[in-house]
Amino acid sequence: MIKALNLTHYYNKDLALENINLEINKGEFVSIIGESGSGKSTLLSLLSTLLKPTSGEIFFENTNYKNIKDIDNFRKTNIGFIFQFHYLINYLTVKENIKLANEKASNDEIYNLLKLLKIENLLDKYPNEISGGQKQRVAIARALINKPKVIIADEPTGNLDSKNSLNVFEILKNLSEEGTTIIVATHDKELAKFANKIYEVKDGKIN
Amino acid sequence: MISYAFKALFANKLKTFLIILSLIFSIVSIFLISSISNGVISMYSSMLKSDGDIIVTQAKISDTFFSNVNINLVEKINNLKDIKDTSAMTVGASPVEKLPIVAVYGVTKNRFKNYTLIAGNYPSKNEVIIGKSILEQLFNKNEIQIANKSFKISGVFKSEIGFENGGVVLNIDEAGEIFNKSASMILVNTTLNSNIENIIKDIKNLSDEIDVKSTQNFVDNYNQFKIIKTSSNVISFIAFSMGLLGIVSLMSITINQRKAEFGIKRALGIKTSKIVYSIMVESFLLGVFSFISALIISNVTLYFVKNAKSLQGYVNGEISVELAFYIFVTSILMAIIGSIIPALNAAKTDPVELIQGNKI
């Protein structure tokens, strides 16, 4: 589904990633592990079209990223993001935050999605009225509302306790079993074991 | 979109309040300076227009206050074809009691009808009629002194024109003695459907020392009005620029604090144009709200200015529909132009910073 060939990326003159090759299949749960500053976030940014590589190629379902004309729309329809910090907009309700990712999503769709994540009672709550774990689940709902083919999650449990962390990874695991490709960057090697493929990034290279 | 914009504005109450305050100050300044200068022009031009289609002043004199026209021309003009009525007026100013400056109008008898009496009679020799607003400020309501000469107050009139309501009217020959001139100007009323240009030529032929214009032409080209308008435009532009700078700086601060919001929107695939548009909608709402508030504040201020005794009714702002529309457009432009640069910066927020774990 996603294939990276000879990816190299520099920030100005600083090498961040060197000669990365990887292949991720549909429905796979992939963990990218590595120390802080190892290059895993750069890799996620490249795979999610947020960054253009200095050299190398990335293919999404055999389409080269370089040939995608409307990159915003491509990202909107194919990739869902979950960040370490939930980045919910405080002045919007849970429902409105989710609608931000898909204006056309019906109330029923949003409700069913929240029900799946067991937070349907939070529909009209504001982010400051719910807990950290609930916020991250809302962020997951926001990532899922477009029914993306791939979910890219960067340290999604970085701000959660172990119970909530486990819960989030269970949700991601279920999504992957239903066919959504999951790419997660984490430093937690225990949680990384949920994945059926693990890449370790070290000094900008995959071991 | 609009409900989200409202929510965004309410979420940043203090900054929204400061932006609105900055906009209101600028818009009120533009309103007041424009309406007061328009009011001054309107008051003086109304006085001129009230009695004539044609105005005769001294040639090569740029201000009616310094103009001196031979009053004998009144009769000669009256004898021309298509002339309905001709009057003369001397304009001057004098201190009266404790008031430093009071408008004094010397007029021919046929012009007295322009002053609607609310008490007493039109003036005879050594008498004056005075405007209602000036009467309220006089200690001696029976007699006034103009240039060391005493005049009995024979009547009180009321006028919608502030310059008249705050003025003194007397016979033109007595005004001529005070201000040492025959008449400041002659106002000519023509018959219906007459050819104004031909009449102007006929009047010009009567003397080489006069300048003759249609009243509208005179008002449009009067240098004092041009100076007032230019000054008003310059001050309005400064107020606009100050408002603009205020919006740019406050919006920049607000938007900088909302960078994470724009970063997540970019990451979610929302186009930069849509992000800019959403900020423009917020700016539009700020502009509309500020305009409405400024309109109310300006009207209240102008009411107090109009009724302030110390200003003798000489300062009278007018907010016409045209002016309100012009300032509405200016307000919206100010809000939107002031937000464009911060909005473009917001739209450029790099979502990579989010994915790299920075709380931007």
Image: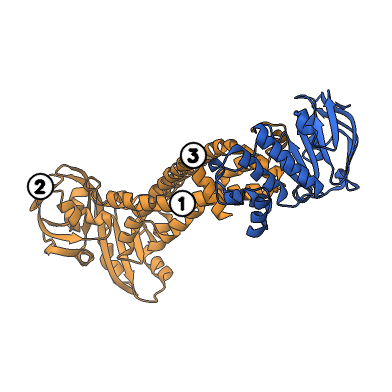
> Which of the two residues, B207 or A96, is positioned nearer the viewer here?
A96
- The residue type indicated by label 3 comes to Lys
Chain B appears what colour?
Answer: orange
x 51%, y 52%: residue:
B285
- The residue type indicated by label 2 comes to Phe
> Which of the two residues, B165 or B212, is positioned nearer the viewer here?
B165
**Percent x, y for residue B234?**
46, 43
The chain drawn blue is chain what?
A
Q: Residue B15's mark?
A: 3
- The residue type indicated by label 1 comes to Phe
Q: Residue B289's mark?
A: 1
Q: Point out the tag, 1 or 3, that comes first from the N-terminus.
A: 3
**Percent x, y for residue A117?**
67, 48
Asked if the residues shown at circle 1 and circle 3 are in contact, with their CB atoms under 8 angstroms apart, the answer is: no
Label 1 sits on a secondary structure element that is helix
Mark 2 falls within which chain?
A: B
> Which of the two residues, A71 or A156, is positioned nearer the viewer here?
A156
Q: Residues within 10 Å of mark 2 (few under 14, many from 20)?
A: few
Decide if residue B166 is in sight here. Answer: yes
- Nearer to us of marks 2 and 1 is 1
Same chain check for tags 2 and 1: yes
Q: Residues within 10 Å of mark 3 (few under 14, many from 20)?
A: some
- Nearer to us of marks 1 and 3 is 3
Mark 1 falls within which chain?
A: B
Q: Residue B139's mark?
A: 2
Q: In screen coordinates, is A57 left or right of A175?
A: right
Q: Give above or below for B250 relative to B210.
A: above
x 58%, y 39%: residue:
A131
Q: In screen coordinates, is A192 left or right of A97?
A: right
